Image (spheres, rainbow, N blue to C red):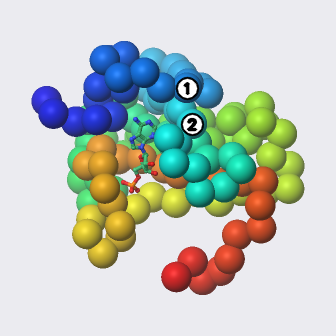
Amino acid sequence: MDCLFCKIINKEIPSNVVYENDDVLAFYDIAPQAPVHVVIIPKQHIASPAHITAENCDIAGKMFLAASEIAKKLELEKGYRIVSNCGEDGGQTVQHLHFHLLAKRSLAWPPG
Ligand code: AMP
Ligand code: ZN
């Protein structure tokens, strides 16, 4: 499958891994939008948040657990933001479900 994040999972494309278990992989974003910018992905290919179903939704909890563990590991005690872009209007550019974990700067709200 021609999916960038599946290629990162399969180590066909290198990444700077922060966290990994049987279900989830997290790596530093190549174009960071904050001093800490980690991408958290499921190892199974799910195209976007819109492709979450009753059958595969357990992975969402595992992705949030990964975020919480990464935040502890990177000492993000001041806080962080988790973003999941979905579809064209959401600004999604890679069609494999992911969370952005952004931290170490004050983040505006609303995001614009
Ligand atoms: P999105 O625009 O929400 O789909 O997010 C995709 C993210 O993947 C962007 O923040 C990109 O900078 C990031 N990205 C693209 N290619 C790579 C790569 N090879 N390694 C790490 N992050 C990447
Ligand atoms: Zn994929």
Q: Which residue is mark 1?
A: 16
Q: Is residue 60 left or right of residue 80?
A: left
Q: Residue furthest front?
A: 31
Residue 83 percent location from the top left of the image: 52, 60
Which of 93/54 is in front? 93
Q: Secondary structure at mark 2?
A: strand
Asked whether the residues under the numbered discs 2 and 1 touch, taking CB atoms below 8 Å apart as contact, a structural biologist would say: yes
Q: How packed is label 1: few (under 14 Cα within 10 Å), some, or many (20 or more)?
A: few
Whole-number angstrom distance, CA of label 2 to CA of label 1: 6 Å
Q: Amino acid at mark 1?
A: Asn
- Residue that appears at 30% across and 49% down: 94
2 or 1: tag closer to the N-terminus: 1
Q: Amino acid at mark 2?
A: Tyr
Q: Total of numbered circles in the picture?
A: 2
Name the quadrant containing residue 41: top left
Which of 67/110 is in front? 110
Q: Is residue 106 left or right of residue 67?
A: right
Residue 100 percent location from the top left of the image: 53, 51
Residue 51 seen from this side? yes
Quarter of the figure that contains the N terminus: top left
Name the quadrant containing residue 103: bottom right
Q: Is residue 42 left or right of residue 96?
A: right
Q: Which residue is mark 2?
A: 28
Q: Is mark 2 within 8 Å of ligand 1?
A: yes
Residue 47 percent location from the top left of the image: 24, 47
